[in-house]
Amino acid sequence: MNITLFDQNTLVLLFVAFLGVFIWRYLGVIYSKKIENESIAAKTVNSIAYGMTTAIVCKIVFFPDNALNLIPKLDRTTSFFIGIGVFLLFSRNTNLGLLAGISSFSIFLFVRNYLI
């Protein structure tokens, strides 16, 4: 199966994805001042956002489709878990966890491609 950018199905999928994200963000802007941070609605929206992000990252790390599939699964998963570990170890610092995950992935790629 060959998917191109100008394929009709691809354009429909891109449009539907854009519409879903746009509507969600638009509703967030409209209702953000009317919702308290600790309310059930705010926690629900936060949970949905975290769930969607987690699902996308897990799909990319564990079941890649494109060039990332050429990277050994051990390198991808180890970097993923290093990032999560640093995130949890340093009081849920997102930037530090992301930096650790990306840095470890870069080191694994460098070692595998240039030193081994």
Image (tube, rainbow, N blue to C red):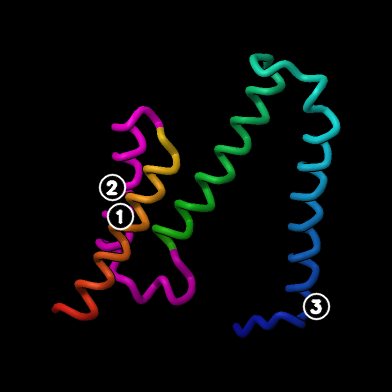
Of label 3 and label 2, which has the lower sequence position? Answer: 3
Secondary structure under badge 2?
A: helix
Q: Amino acid at mark 3?
A: Gln
Give the alpha-carbon distance from disc 1 to disc 3, as whole Å.
36 Å
Q: Position of residue 89 (x, y in %)?
A: 29, 32
Of label 1 and label 3, which has the lower sequence position? Answer: 3
Q: Amino acid at mark 1?
A: Ser
Q: Nearer the viewer, mark 3 or mark 2?
A: 2
The boundaries of the magenta stretch are 64-92
Q: Label 1, on which residue?
A: 79
Quadrant assignment for the N terminus:
bottom right
Q: Label 3, on which residue?
A: 8
Q: Label 2, on which residue?
A: 82
Q: Position of residue 51 (x, y in %)?
A: 56, 39
Magenta span includes 88: yes
Residue at 77%, 19% in the rendered image: 35
Residue at 45%, 51% in the rendered image: 58
Give the alpha-carbon distance from disc 3 to disc 2, as whole Å.
40 Å
Q: Is residue 13 above or below residue 21?
A: below
Badge 1: few (under 14), some or many (20 or more) residues near its Cα, within 10 Å?
A: many
Picture quadrant where residue 5 is located: bottom right
Q: Is residue 48 above or below residue 10?
A: above
Q: Are marks 2 and 1 in contact (CB under 8 Å)?
A: yes
Q: Amino acid at mark 2?
A: Ile
Residue at 81%, 54% in the rendered image: 19
Secondary structure under badge 3?
A: helix
Q: Between residues 57 and 103, which one lies in front from this camera angle? A: 103
